[in-house]
Image (spheres, coloured by chain):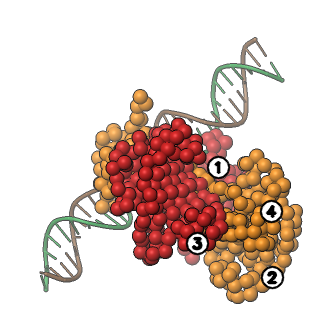
Chain colours: A red, B orange, C brown, D green
Amino acid sequence: MSEIDTNSWRGIHLELLRRINEREWPPGSAVPNEADLAAEFGCARTTVNRAMRELADAGLINRRRKAGTHVALHPTSRVVLDIPIIRLEVEQRDAQWRYGLLSQEILAAPARITSRLGLERGTPMLHISSVHFANSHPFLHEDRWINPTAVPGVETVDFATVNANEWLIQNAPYTSGDIAFSAMNADKALAELLEAPEGAAVFVVDRITWNKNEPVTAVRLSYAPGYRMHTRL
Amino acid sequence: MSEIDTNSWRGIHLELLRRINEREWPPGSAVPNEADLAAEFGCARTTVNRAMRELADAGLINRRRKAGTHVALHPTSRVVLDIPIIRLEVEQRDAQWRYGLLSQEILAAPARITSRLGLERGTPMLHISSVHFANSHPFLHEDRWINPTAVPGVETVDFATVNANEWLIQNAPYTSGDIAFSAMNADKALAELLEAPEGAAVFVVDRITWNKNEPVTAVRLSYAPGYRMHTRL
DNA sequence: CATGTTATTATGTGCATACATAATAGGTAT
DNA sequence: ATACCTATTATGTATGCACATAATAACATG
């Protein structure tokens, strides 16, 4: 049997997890306060606090000053997704990455883009369309709009040799963003690019980023059919 | 101008974020050590440590003992998704939630389930098929397999009156799990259940949970077309 | 020169203490 | 009762100190 180290926040974290999991502290019930737990475990309150903070971050308990700590009634499972740059994502699958630029031009951005970014209708933006390949098979289509005033110098970049995904991460910092996942039927054009049948279900990631209230870029990644995004809970 | 409170870990966290974002500390560069930063900000090392830990958790910096702290080369954006129980998800959209059981029976589980769970082929499991509605429109189809030996008492539950999603969260704790997101074309049966055209792109969540190496449940949630899962970065 | 040993260094963690802050409970005046 | 003020309480955070631990660098030894 592995003894619990009640002197380390990890040990205490595990023990509290156990009490919650085994319904020793059922959902909704009050958890003893930090001082009491510290006394029970024979450690400093700081240590209990650290353990409890992790549980709160994971959504398993709710904490409020004075009101105390309670086991979450509906423990929303909190999933952490790491979204790497596309080249690495391909290489992590032991596949060879390749990138092909389809078009790069300054255009009046369509309303669906400007409205979401909070820009004037018809603002000139840099539009980039490209495909990332894994072992010569299409992996995803990247459809991106960049706000040139937020990213000085983009106009001069040749996105045939450098891919936009990576260049932006290196050169266009953002302070906040919005990301959405959905499923879409591939239209004829997309289907051709992804070498998939028309109408095929495609996993889509829409991402928008801002740098201090200034919109930077809006991108849609359409993954070739069969793509799965997964993590552990 | 808002002054930075260099005495609070939040203030320091913001200041470090700024230095990273504005390329004062470019990707790959070394960050001063905790002691030096503490001296610079005039605070305790503990406070700097707290701020840096947050940055490390967010994937913006990499920390290694002795080697020191470095700004991440490819800052993988880390997304946190909260997956609430389905009823709450519907109600958060200001819609009325309703639930309908389609079937509940003990069956020999198909190979695609048992193999992923690490169970004997043909193990008897409780299969539950149900639909969740939002304002009387199908919201998602829940296709679930439960391992009865891991969840004592499931056989006696009437899942026509209690929905499996909620009952399990309350009664079947898990210690680990696996979750995957993908897109699929609805087959004829699913399309009918979701009141969608056959072949419609459907957002699918596959989740498997274990309780200390014992498989608990495998579930597939197929969302009605149009569903978007989104968060902030 | 390769290899194993030993310092050195930066982060990781624990503790006691103090004070800050949010939220509730209790009491007082109107 | 209602509104307002005032304890009280549990969590949140900062500090100085100490020691643990991982990883590297420096050194010594064959």
The residue at 61%/41% (across/down) is: A65
Q: What residue does disc 4 label?
A: B195
State the CA–CA distance, disc 3 to disc 2.
Answer: 36 Å
Residue B16 shows up from this direction = no
Identity, as a three-letter code, of the amino acid under mark 1: Asn
Residue A220, above or below A87: above
Identity, as a three-letter code, of the amino acid under mark 2: Leu
- Within 10 angstroms of label 4, few (less than 14), some, or many (20 or more) residues? some
State the CA–CA distance, disc 3 to disc 4.
Answer: 25 Å
| Same subunit, tags 2 and 1 | no
- Residue B101 is labelled as none
The residue at 39%/45% (across/down) is: A151
Image coordinates for residue A171, horizontal then vertical, percent: 37, 51
Q: Quadrant of residue A116?
A: top right
The residue at 79%/59% (across/down) is: B138
Q: Earlier in the sequence, mark 4 or mark 2?
A: 2
Q: What residue does disc 3 label?
A: A196
| Same subunit, tags 4 and 2 | yes
Identity, as a three-letter code, of the amino acid under mark 3: Ala
- Residue A62 is labelled as 1
